[in-house]
Image: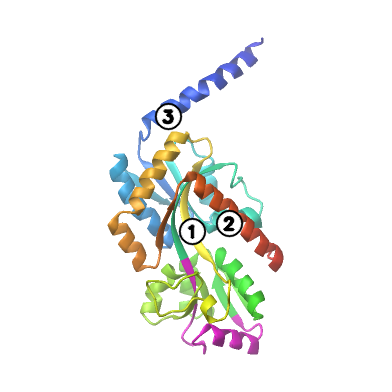
Amino acid sequence: MNATRRSMIAAALALPCLRLRAAESFPARPVRLVVPNPPGGTVDLVARLVAHGLGESLGQHAMVEPRPGGNTVIGTELVARAAPDGHTVLMVGTPFAINAVLRPLPYDSLRDFAPVARLALLPFVFAVHPSVPARSLAELVALGRARAGALNYASFGLGQLAGESFKRSAAVDMNFIPYQGGVQATAAVVAGHAGVLLAPLSDAMPHIEAGRLRPLAVTSAERSEALPELPTAAEVGHAGFEWTSWIGAAVPAATPRAVVERLAQEMTRAIRRPEAVATLRRLSVSPAPLGPAEFERAIRASMQAYETVVRQAGIKVE
C-alpha cells in the first residue's frame, strides 16, 4: 500500500472523530446568520428575532450578516463554501428553491446544504398605487383586460411565479418588473414606478397602513390576521390560487447531524418566544416551525411546484 493510499484511508477514518469533536464543542465562537436578501425585509427581520433568542440559548453571540445580491445567490454561495461546523447559517426563503429551477448556480441547492428548520410562513398581497383605479381584484383584472399591456407589476422571486400564474388563470395582461426583494418592489410602487404590487404582506403593511398602497387581496388560503377584512384571491373568484412564502435556515451539507439538530431546536425555540410571535403576527407572518427532515421534504415539494409553473408559463431568466 503506497503512502498516498494510506493517507487517504487515515483521513477517512479520522473524519467521524473530527465531526464528533466539532459537534461536542459547538458553539465554540459566535454564530453568523447570513441573510442573502436586502436588509429591512422579512427574512432580515426573522433572522434578527432568531438571533436574539439564539444568542441567549447557545451562550454565544449570534449576529446577522446581510449579504444581498444576485437574487440571493451571493450570500447563498458564501455559506455553501463555509466551514461545515454550524457557525455559519444561511437564512433561506423561497428564492432558494426558485433559483434551483430557473438558472445555473455555483452550488447545488439540495446537495450542498442541510436544511435546519422552517421558521415562518407569509402570504403575498396584491396591492396598487392609489392612482390606479381598481378597488378590488376583479376591477384590477377588468382594468388589465381593458388596457392590455399597460399595467406593470413589481415583484421578485415567488411573486413572479404567482403573477405569471395569475395572468394565465385570469386571462389578464400585465408586465413583470423585477426587483431584488419585496422592500424594493414595494418602494417602487409607492413611488409610482409601477402600478401594481405583488409582494409579501409584511413588506407592504407599513405603506398600506399609511394609505400609500391600496390592498386588493392576499394570496394565502386564509385571510390575514393583520387585515381580516381583506379577502383571499380564492374568495373573489380565483379558486385554487394560493401562494405562500416560507423562511427557514440551512447549513453546509457536511455539518454534523448533532449540530444541525441543536440549531433546529434552538432556532425553533427562538421563533416561538412570545415577543417574537407578537412581532411576526403584527406583520402577518406566521411562526411555522418544521424540523430538518420535514423542512427538506417541503423544499423538495416547493421545487417541484415551482418547476411546473416555470414550464407552463415559459418563464426564462433574461
Compare residues 74 and 269 and report the one nearer the observer. 269
For residue 22, which numbered disc appears in the image? Answer: 3
Tell me: residue 131, above or below residue 231: below
Compare residues 158 and 182 and report the one nearer the observer. 158
| Residue named by callout 1 | 246
| Residue named by callout 2 | 302
Q: Is the C-beta separation of discs 2 and 1 under 8 Å? A: yes
Tell me: residue 117, above or below residue 12: below
Mark 3 surroundings: few (<14), some (14-19) or many (≥20) residues within 10 A: some
Q: As drawn, which residue projects farthest toward the top?
A: 1
Q: Position of residue 149 (x, y in %)?
A: 66, 82
> Which of the two labelled residues, at mark 2 and mark 1, occupies the earlier sequence position?
1
Indicate the amino acid at tag 3: Ala
Magenta residues (range): 123-151
Residue 86 seen from this side: no
Q: Please give the name of the residue rendered at 47% of the width and 35% of the height, measured from the top-left corner.
A: 257
> Which of the two labelled residues, at mark 1 and mark 3, occupies the earlier sequence position?
3
Q: Please give the name of the residue rendered at 60% of the width and 88% of the height, measured from the top-left corner.
A: 142
User: Is 266 part of what is drawn in magenta?
Assistant: no
Looking at the rendered image, the disc whose residue lies closer to the viewer, 3 or 2, is 2
Residue 127 seen from this side: yes
Tell me: residue 80, above or below residue 21: below
Indicate the amino acid at tag 2: Ser
Mark 2 surroundings: few (<14), some (14-19) or many (≥20) residues within 10 A: some
Q: Position of residue 92 (x, y in %)?
A: 49, 53
Quarter of the image where one finds residue 224: bottom left
Tell me: residue 152, above or below residue 1: below
Alpha carbon of mark 1 to alpha carbon of mark 3: how far? 30 Å
Indicate the amino acid at tag 1: Trp
> Which of the two labelled residues, at mark 3 and mark 2, occupies the earlier sequence position?
3
